[in-house]
Image (cartoon, coloured by chain):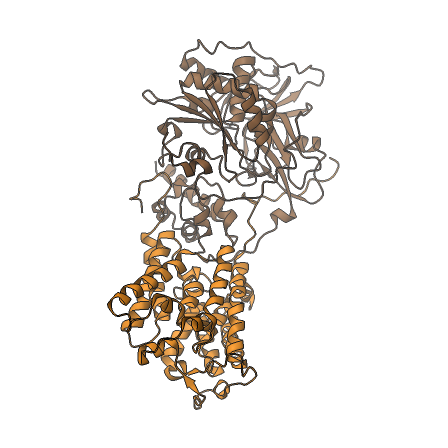
């Protein structure tokens, strides 16, 4: 060989990798949410777009502002801040003032993620933390639901959306009740077809159950989510409501109503499955899902709120490290008693 | 053997990964012999265990196949000269890992015929088991699948332990490698003869040859060569990495888990690579000690990929030269497979007994991937064939909490690299685990 030898690298095996990367997985979740996002914009008009945009902007700003400073904005490339903002936006009422949505995104990412050390280190789901903050701070605005226009008034913007920060929160639009609220406070049952196809009032992302399921199937096919978590949550909720139905069919929701109402599908498929804040072990995933399902039903049936998905997931987030510790998989060639 | 019919169909262990095979480059290329070159280097420590002890001195003439180093202990084997020539030096040479280590340098005689100095065939049938095992040691035979663990140690079964099955490992689950594949296709008789020798000496009832089902020609040819009445079965296995890890193969074939910290013999099985079995046949039937081996030269950086018979001690430079040299964009050379092999720092390192391949990679495979934080997605848990928690182990290793890693069974890790292959955040998980294991082992040694 006359040529000079190449300067050989010494990277250790394995040199081969599969094609999935973390930013790709995060973008997959965003793609999976696009149909439901589109539907929410169709149902609630441009206001929906404003709310979603504001919460994404808040999340992105927090990520950018609190980045460790060496290369500001570097961590935005993994798309997780956008995803957090989008998820938060989908849990908000369509007529929420934009500044509140913005604040929610900002608080969610800063308190829910950045102060823990950034991506991969947080205990709680940042989007739900942002929502919990909004719920505690603006209880009225967070429970004021505008009427689903079903595409009829696409270009109109609710006056409340544009309310100025800290001014009157501007709840003067026509308000309506969500299916869970109607059931809890008026004993009125919404037809199942409306729940599935989105002809209901509620937060942006919870109105189209079928599209949420569709996105979930996409994520499952791409192996981006642990199927055990949504399956165990939904099964628990179905079983729980079936048992309650045996006692008093009129007072308690039917299993299918429970599954398709409120933010359950959004929470079970897209939020409880956040890999960072849910257990990594297979057995842990089952326990986590069952825990979320039970808490959702307890809060919905016995609590003072019509909806309980947010608190159910946040509470189980807190239990995740403990669940992981006690559900280590059985190592090959070792007995069942190994930790 | 009771087994649920479904798992019988699947013929596989659980978890593992599916890397692209990359075998089409070489799987149909017949094994070629490389010409003899000028300089050979035989490291004394090219197997697991105690290094061999040189029995030749500088200036001494040696014949091809002559003993040049004897075993340095029980877990050690003999070395034979790969070439007729003169011992140039017994001293330190640059090894595969870049460190200097004792080796024997031999300069080939350009005028010698290189006629191999084969001994007579051995009467293995009437040989006692002790003599047989000693003969395997003196033949210098080690596991040729890559681990290079001395074969006679594997064949030494303590009293009271019964071996029922001889499992011959022809899985070749590492991408790119086709040397075992070609050996099965081209030398099925030697494989079956060697298997029969080992089976009878171990007193096993049956030989099972496990082959991944992406080598249908090998499966068909071996089946055709089985003698009537010979207790041999060829079992096609699911194509999945690491099917060739011996405990995984035992799980696939017998649906049995070898308990952690124990050996295949504890479930009445003895596992040997096809190359090792052929080497045993060559020694006992033809008197040839281990002086050469089959390896695959492949990868995107090689001009003419090939399957070769290479005398041990041949510099990688000469092997690559025979294959048309490196392409300009070559960046890294791996000895062994791309999942578990070792990178080499220089083209001057020699081919060793455990070297199943010389793979040349380019920028595309070696570009530094951006590392992201672990998001605990669990892909590594679903990849790990040992059901460990690589995500947790990597975090603990990063925090230097090596002792805590023992609670997560870090020493059960065989470093197959599935976790690292599967990680979407490009975290060097297996490297972090290796660091921790090294640290724990060295600390234990220094305490003793």
Q: Position of residue A71 (x, y in %)?
A: 56, 66
Q: Position of residue A323 (x, y in %)?
A: 33, 56
Residue drawn where x is 55% and y is 44% of the image: B19
Q: Is residue B312 left or right of residue A233?
A: right
- Closer to us: B191 or A339: B191
> Against A220, is A84 above or below?
below
Dividing the image into 4 quarters, which one contains the C terminus of chain B?
A: top left
Dividing the picture into quarters, in which one does residue B39 lie? Answer: top right
> Against A324, is A31 above or below?
below
Q: Is residue B255 left or right of residue B114?
A: left
Q: Position of residue A82 (x, y in %)?
A: 52, 69
Q: Is residue B11 visible?
A: no
Chain A's shade in the image? orange
- Closer to us: B235 or A187: A187
Q: Position of residue B244 (x, y in %)?
A: 49, 34
Chain B's shade in the image? brown
Dividing the picture into quarters, in which one does residue A335 lie? Answer: top left
């Amino acid at each position: 060989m006359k040529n000079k030898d190449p300067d050989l690298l010494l990277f250790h095996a394995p040199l081969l990798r599969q094609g999935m990367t973390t930013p790709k997985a995060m973008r997959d979740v965003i793609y999976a949410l696009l149909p439901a996002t589109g539907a929410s914009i169709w149902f609630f008009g441009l206001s929906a777009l404003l709310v979603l945009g504001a919460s994404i902007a808040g999340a992105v700003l927090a990520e950018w502002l609190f980045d460790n400073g060496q290369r500001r904005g570097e961590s935005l490339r993994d798309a997780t801040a956008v995803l957090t903002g989008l998820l938060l936006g989908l849990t908000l009422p369509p007529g929420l003032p934009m500044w509140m949505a913005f604040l929610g995104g900002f608080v969610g990412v800063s308190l829910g993620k950045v102060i823990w050390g950034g991506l991969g280190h947080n205990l709680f789901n940042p989007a739900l933390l942002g929502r919990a903050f909004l719920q505690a701070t603006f209880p009225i605005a967070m429970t004021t639901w505008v009427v689903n226009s079903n595409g009829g008034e696409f270009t109109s913007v609710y006056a409340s959306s544009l309310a100025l920060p800290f001014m009157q929160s501007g709840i003067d639009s026509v308000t309506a009740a969500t299916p869970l609220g109607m059931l809890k406070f008026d004993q009125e049952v919404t037809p199942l077809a409306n729940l599935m196809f989105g002809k209901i009032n509620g937060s942006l992302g919870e109105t189209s159950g079928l599209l949420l399921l569709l996105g979930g199937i996409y994520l499952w096919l791409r192996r981006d989510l642990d199927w055990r978590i949504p399956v165990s949550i939904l099964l628990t909720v179905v079983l729980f409501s079936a048992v309650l139905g045996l006692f008093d069919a009129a007072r308690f929701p039917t299993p299918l109503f429970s599954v398709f109402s409120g933010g359950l599908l959004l929470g079970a498929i897209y939020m409880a499955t956040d890999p960072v804040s849910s257990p990594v072990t297979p057995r842990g995933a089952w326990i986590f899902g069952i825990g979320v399902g039970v808490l959702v039903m307890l809060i919905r049936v016995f609590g003072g709120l019509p909806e309980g998905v947010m608190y159910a997931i946040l509470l189980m987030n807190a239990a995740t490290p403990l669940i992981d510790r006690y559900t280590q998989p059985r190592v090959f060639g070792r007995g069942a008693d190994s930790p | 053997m009771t087994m649920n019919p479904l798992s019988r169909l699947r013929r596989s262990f659980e978890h593992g990964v599916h890397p692209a095979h990359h075998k089409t480059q070489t799987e149909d290329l017949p094994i070629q012999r490389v010409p003899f070159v000028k300089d050979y280097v035989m490291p004394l420590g090219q197997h697991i265990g105690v290094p061999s002890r040189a029995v030749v001195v500088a200036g001494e003439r040696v014949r091809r196949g002559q003993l040049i180093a004897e075993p340095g202990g029980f877990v050690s084997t003999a070395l034979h000269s790969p070439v007729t020539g003169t011992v140039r030096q017994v001293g330190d040479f640059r090894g595969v890992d870049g460190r200097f280590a004792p080796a024997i340098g031999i300069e080939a005689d350009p005028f010698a015929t290189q006629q191999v100095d084969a001994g007579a065939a051995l009467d293995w049938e009437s040989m006692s088991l002790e003599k047989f095992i000693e003969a395997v040691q003196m033949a210098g035979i080690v596991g040729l699948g890559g681990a290079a663990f001395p074969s006679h140690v594997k064949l030494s079964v303590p009293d009271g332990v019964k071996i029922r099955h001889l499992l011959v490992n022809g899985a070749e689950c590492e991408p790119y490698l086709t040397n075992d594949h070609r050996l099965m296709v081209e030398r099925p008789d030697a494989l079956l003869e060697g298997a029969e020798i080992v089976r009878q000496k171990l007193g096993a009832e049956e030989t099972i040859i496990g082959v991944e089902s992406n080598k249908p020609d090998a499966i068909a040819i071996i089946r055709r060569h089985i003698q009537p009445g010979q207790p041999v079965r060829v079992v096609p296995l699911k194509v999945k990495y690491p099917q060739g890890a011996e405990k995984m193969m035992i799980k696939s074939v017998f649906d049995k888990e070898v308990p952690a910290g124990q050996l295949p013999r504890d479930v009445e099985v003895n596992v040997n690579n096809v190359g090792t079995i052929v080497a045993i046949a060559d020694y006992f039937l033809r008197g040839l000690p281990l002086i050469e081996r089959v390896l695959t030269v492949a990868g995107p950086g090689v001009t003419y990929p090939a399957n070769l018979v290479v005398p041990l001690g041949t510099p990688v430079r000469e092997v690559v030269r025979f294959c048309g040299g490196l392409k300009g964009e070559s960046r890294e050379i791996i000895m062994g497979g791309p999942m578990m092999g070792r990178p080499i720092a220089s083209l001057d390192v020699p081919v060793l007994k455990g070297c199943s391949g010389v793979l040349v990679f380019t920028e595309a495979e070696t570009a530094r991937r951006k590392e992201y934080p672990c998001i605990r997605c669990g892909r590594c848990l679903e990849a790990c064939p040992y059901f460990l928690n690589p995500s947790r182990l990597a975090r603990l290793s990063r925090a230097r909490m090596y002792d805590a890693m023992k609670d997560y069974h870090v020493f059960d890790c065989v470093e197959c690299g599935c976790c690292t292959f599967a990680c979407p955040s490009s975290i060097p998980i297996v490297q972090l685990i290796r660091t921790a294991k090294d640290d724990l082992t060295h600390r234990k040694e220094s305490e003793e």
